[in-house]
C-alpha cells in the first residue's frame, strides 16, 4: 500500500528572506551527476532519524546509498550548487512486494522514496527555503562543482574540513521522461513526504567509473561507517534536468 498522508496542511506560499516562494517550486534548468552504492542496511538504518522509516533492502542485508551533485542553473530558489546524500527507504508497514526484487523494481520505476541524510548547498536563500518549506537538512557549505571536460568533479568542504571529493563520467544521448518521485523529511518532529516531478535530456547511465575520496570531517566518517569509499554500482548523468517540487504533506 502507498504511504498514507493527511490532507495537506502546509501553506502554498512562503516568505523567505523577504522573497515570496509559491508552490510548486520549479526547476527549469539543471545538470546533475550521481552515483549509487550497495551498503549495509544495518549501518544505514543507524543513521536514519526517527522510527517511522526503514532502509529498503534490495539484497539480504543491503540497501542503496546515493550521492548526487547538482548545478541548479535556473530555479525558483536561485542559481546554486548542491550535494545530496540519500538512502532509498520505505515507511514501516508499507507493502514490500516480492522480497528484495520488489524494492529493486520499485527503485527502477521511481516508486521507492528516499530519505536525505545531508543536503549542503552554497547559497543561504535556498538553504533557508529548503529547511522551512520541506524540512530538508540543508546547510550552507563550500561546494565546487565542475562539469567541464569528460567528467564531473565535485568537492564538498564543511566547517573548514573536506567531506568528500567525487569524480563521475558525463555525457549521454537519452531522454528521461517525466517521473513523479517522493522523499521523506521531518518538520517540527513530524514525518512529511514531498512529491516532485523530474525529467531530463542528455541522460547517460554507466556501470562504475566513479572515483570517491573521503576527508576528515565527521560526515566523512558516517560514509566510512557504510563501507565507503568502494566501487559504485552505477553512475547517472543528466545534462539538462527539469522538475517541480510540491509542498510537503504530513504523513499519518
Image (cartoon, grey):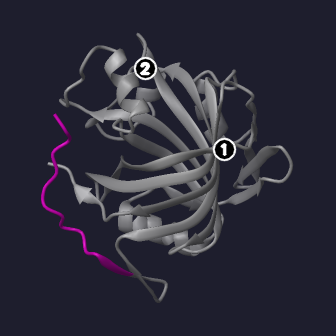
Q: Secondary structure at mark 2?
A: helix
Between marks 2 and 1 in the image, the one whose residue lies nearer the viewer: 1
Q: Would you call the spot at circle 2 few (<14 residues within 10 Å), some (14-19), or many (20 or more)?
A: some
Whether residue 207 appears in this view of the structure is: yes
Outermost right residue: 149
For the stretch drawn in magenta, the main secondary structure is: loop
Quadrant of the drawing holding the N terminus? top left
User: Which residue matches tag 2?
Assistant: 42
| Residue 204 position by quadrant | top right
| Residue 104 position by quadrant | top left
User: Which residue matches tag 1?
Assistant: 173
Q: Residue at x 64, y 27 (%)?
A: 224
How far apart are the two marked residues, 2 and 1, measured between alpha carbons?
37 Å
Would residue 76 appear left or right of 182 to someone viewing this image? Answer: right
Tell me where the magenta segment starts and ends, as one range. 1-14
Q: Secondary structure at mark 1?
A: loop
Magenta span includes 98: no
Label disc, if present, on residue 88 of the rendered structure:
none
Outermost bottom residue: 18
Would residue 75 appear left or right of 59 to someone viewing this image? Answer: right
Q: Residue at x 43, y 13 (%)?
A: 59
Amino acid at each position: 500500500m502507498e504511504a498514507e498522508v493527511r490532507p495537506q496542511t502546509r501553506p502554498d506560499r512562503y516568505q523567505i528572506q523577504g522573497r515570496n516562494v509559491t508552490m510548486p517550486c520549479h526547476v527549469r534548468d539543471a545538470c546533475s551527476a550521481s552515483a549509487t552504492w550497495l551498503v549495509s542496511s544495518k549501518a544505514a538504518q543507524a543513521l536514519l532519524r526517527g522510527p517511522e522509516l526503514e532502509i529498503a533492502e534490495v539484497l539480504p542485508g543491503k540497501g542503496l546509498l546515493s550521492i548526487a551533485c547538482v548545478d541548479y542553473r535556473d530555479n525558483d530558489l536561485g542559481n546554486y550548487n548542491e550535494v545530496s546524500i540519500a538512502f532509498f527507504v520505505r515507511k514501516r508497514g508499507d507493502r514490500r512486494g516480492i522480497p528484495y526484487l520488489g524494492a529493486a523494481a520499485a527503485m527502477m520505476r521511481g516508486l521507492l522514496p528516499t530519505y536525505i541524510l545531508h543536503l549542503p548547498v552554497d547559497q543561504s536563500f535556498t538553504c533557508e527555503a529548503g529547511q522551512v518549506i520541506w524540512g530538508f537538512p540543508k546547510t550552507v557549505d563550500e561546494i565546487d562543482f565542475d562539469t567541464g571536460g569528460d567528467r564531473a568533479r565535485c568537492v564538498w568542504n564543511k566547517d573548514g574540513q573536506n567531506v568528500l571529493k567525487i569524480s563521475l563520467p558525463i555525457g549521454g544521448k537519452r531522454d528521461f521522461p517525466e517521473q513523479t518521485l517522493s522523499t521523506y523529511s521531518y518538520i517540527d518532529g513530524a514525518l512529511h513526504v514531498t512529491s516532485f516531478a523530474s525529467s531530463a535530456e542528455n541522460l547517460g547511465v554507466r556501470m562504475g567509473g566513479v572515483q570517491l575520496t573521503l576527508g576528515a570531517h565527521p560526515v566523512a566518517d558516517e560514509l566510512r561507517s557504510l563501507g565507503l569509499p568502494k566501487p559504485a554500482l552505477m553512475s547517472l548523468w543528466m545534462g539538462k534536468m527539469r522538475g517541480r517540487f510540491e509542498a510537503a504533506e504530513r504523513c499519518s
